[in-house]
Image: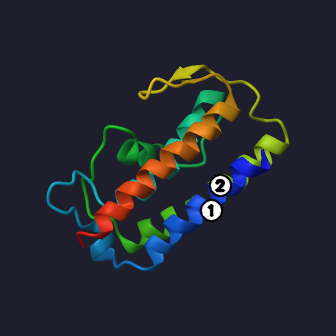
Amino acid sequence: MDQLFTISETSRNLVSKILENHSLEQLNKIPESFSNNLIWNIAHVVVTQQLLVYKLSGLQMIVSDEMIEKYKKGTRPEHKVTQTEVDEIKSLLFTTIEKTKEDYDNRILKNFQEYPTSTGFVLRNVEDAMVFNNFHEGLHIGIIMSLKKFL
């Protein structure tokens, strides 16, 4: 399991560097032919991890309901994100993974509602959810890299 968390932390470090190296204007820009922007993709990976690991485990999520509504699957950027929001998202990149590791180690993430993903993979337990989440974050890092080329 340590490997799963190491991959998550590596992914989040890559994403954090995007936040550090791009202006607020760049983070909010939606390039032509894209339906979202850098900050939406970054917040989306935070929200998705919480939904996959905590909601499917029947536990309280760390992120707010408002954030979930803004960045869950099927949403699009509806507003310009402020620097305060960027700072919160950056913090959540790491606090969510740290809390997940703590809760996993303390066996809090034991109940899990089976979930078939849109890719056809069925999540049967929290370990499946964490593996799938790493796959999902990798997809969005690819999208982020594509978006960067058009800024």
Q: Nearer the viewer, residue 150 or 25?
A: 150
Question: Crowding near pointer 1: few (<14 within 10 Å), some, many (20+)?
Answer: few
Residue drawn at the location 37% of the way across and 77% of the way down: 22
Lateral position of residue 69 relative to residue 137, left or right: left
Residue drawn at the location 62% of the way across and 21% of the way down: 113
Q: Amino acid at mark 2?
A: Ile
- Above or below, 43 against 61 in this view is below
Q: How many marks?
A: 2
Quarter of the picture holding the N terminus: top right
Residue 10: assigned label = 1
Residue drawn at the location 15% of the way across and 54% of the way down: 33
Residue named by callout 2: 7
Lateral position of residue 142 relative to residue 79, left or right: right
Query: Where's residue 136, x and y in %?
Result: 49, 44
Quadrant location of residue 25?
bottom left
The secondary element bearing badge 2 is classed as: helix
